[in-house]
Image (cartoon, grey):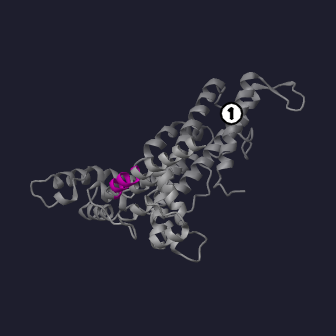
């Protein structure tokens, strides 16, 4: 039941609050079985609305705390407490793991703090009295339904935004491309700021100035910066941003001529290139899928080359991809920072694609 890391529970209580709010504002709801309108007591619904909303906030904080804590492979046990203030403090600290998160969390803090003031224990909206018999909400004369509704809507929108951003960031960190100070996104930003690699030793170049600026911006020590630069230079995409191309295993410029040739049978194609090459080009093609990082190339290639997996490359399919979906093959090459291969592919395959179109046109005319 918890395979979605508590998302259904968290979302369910948020939606329950919104449904109850809608009924309270209309002062009725429609009975599904009969279609009849059933009146509701608006003031009485305030308590379950606030309870559902407060519980949603608690579940939200715990879910995000668990996710944020594992970003840098440091999974921690989420505190088994109900106090929203303590959970918020813990999440604030955890969000320092990535510089994109504190601002996202800031948009949620006011509502969380307000609910924590009204119900610090999670019991106030559940029961009219405490375990000691003290009435809850003695000092609260009323809760404005419009104000509550606006707060619920605003929080839920901001929470959805945070949760969506968190999923993207979590996926990014699972590529294992980060340092103790910089995320993958930070590294890409740094790579885009650096001058061309071949100019770094030039005393008249801008490397030292850019280096100082990046160290100041990201709070990096000399060792932190060196670690980041090393990762950039060894990364297929990021190295291309500094004018350095890392060769792809098994892939060569001459392979593209085979894609444009008249070879058609599986046997002919299998002899034209090694199976390692066909696997590598299949991996390039797969990178073109939206949301797939360049790091996937090495993983997928290893799967294709492993005879114990069910993954394999079929030469006629790879050729078909290159000729009928050239944009996708180009996208894969660009994600891997292969400028020379991109240029060669565009030159060779444009003629092959035009020839394919001519043949299809002649075939249509003959029919």
Q: Quadrant of the C terminus?
A: top right
What secondary structure is found at the residue carrying circle 1?
A: helix
Q: Indicate the position of residue 272 as horizontal and vertical percent values.
A: 45, 70
Q: Chief secondary structure of the magenta span?
A: helix
Check the image and report above or below for 256 versus 113.
Answer: below
Instruction: Kindly identify the residue that appears in the image at 72 percent across and 56 percent down.
Output: 1
Instruction: Kindly identify the residue that appears in the image at 21 percent across and 53 percent down.
Output: 195
- Residue most extreme to the bottom: 308
Check the image and report above or below for 31 versus 191.
Answer: above
Q: Nearer the viewer, residue 270 or 112?
A: 270
* In the displayed structure image, the side of residue 103 where residue 227 appears, left or right: left
The quadrant holding residue 348 is bottom left
Q: Indicate the position of residue 275 as horizontal and vertical percent values.
A: 49, 73
Q: Nearer the viewer, residue 114 or 183?
A: 183
The quadrant holding residue 329 is bottom left
Q: Is residue 214 highlighted in magenta? A: no
Instruction: Kindly identify the residue that appears in the image at 58 percent across and 46 percent down.
Output: 84
- Residue most extreme to the right: 34
**Span colored in magenta:** 341-350
Q: Nearer the viewer, residue 198 or 69?
A: 198
Q: Is residue 29 visible?
A: yes
- Residue most extreme to the top: 26
Check the image and report above or below for 324 versus 49.
Answer: below
Q: Nearer the viewer, residue 107 or 184?
A: 184
Q: Is residue 347 highlighted in magenta? A: yes
* In the displayed structure image, the side of residue 23 where residue 264 appears, left or right: left
The quadrant holding residue 284 is bottom left
* In the displayed structure image, the side of residue 137 where residue 190 appears, left or right: left
Q: Read off the residue under disc 1.
A: 18
């Amino acid at each position: 039941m918890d395979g979605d890391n508590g998302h259904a529970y968290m979302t369910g209580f948020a939606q329950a609050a919104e449904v109850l709010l809608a009924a309270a504002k209309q002062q009725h709801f429609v009975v599904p079985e009969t279609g009849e309108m059933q009146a509701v007591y608006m003031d009485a619904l305030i308590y379950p609305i606030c309870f559902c909303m407060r519980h949603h906030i608690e579940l939200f904080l715990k879910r995000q705390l668990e996710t944020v804590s594992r970003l840098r492979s440091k999974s921690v046990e989420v505190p088994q407490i109900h106090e929203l203030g303590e959970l918020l403090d813990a999440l604030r600290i955890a969000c320092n793991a990535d510089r994109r998160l504190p601002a996202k969390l800031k948009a949620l803090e006011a509502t969380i703090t307000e609910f924590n003031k009204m119900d610090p224990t999670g019991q106030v909206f559940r029961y009219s009295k405490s375990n000691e018999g003290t009435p809850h909400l003695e000092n609260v004369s009323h809760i404005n339904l419009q104000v509550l509704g606006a707060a619920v809507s605003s929080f839920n929108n901001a929470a959805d935004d945070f949760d969506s951003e968190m999923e993207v960031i979590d996926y990014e960190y699972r590529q294992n491309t980060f340092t103790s100070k910089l995320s993958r996104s930070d590294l890409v930003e740094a790579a885009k700021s650096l001058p061309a690699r071949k100019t770094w030793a030039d005393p008249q170049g801008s490397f030292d100035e850019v280096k100082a600026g990046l160290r100041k911006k990201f709070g990096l020590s000399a060792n932190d910066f060196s670690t980041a630069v090393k990762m950039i230079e060894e990364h297929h995409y990021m190295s291309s941003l500094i004018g350095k191309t890392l060769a792809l295993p098994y892939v060569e410029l001459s392979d593209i001529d085979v894609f444009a040739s008249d070879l058609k049978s599986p046997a002919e194609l299998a002899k034209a290139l090694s199976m390692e090459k066909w696997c590598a080009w299949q991996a390039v093609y797969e990178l073109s899928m939206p949301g797939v990082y360049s790091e996937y190339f090495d993983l997928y290639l290893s799967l294709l080359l492993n005879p114990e997996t069910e993954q394999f490359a079929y030469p006629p399919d790879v050729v078909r991809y290159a000729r009928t979906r050239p944009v996708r093959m180009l996208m894969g090459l660009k994600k891997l920072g292969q400028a020379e291969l991109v240029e060669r592919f565009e030159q060779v395959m444009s003629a092959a694609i035009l020839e394919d179109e001519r043949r299809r046109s002649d075939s249509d005319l003959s029919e």
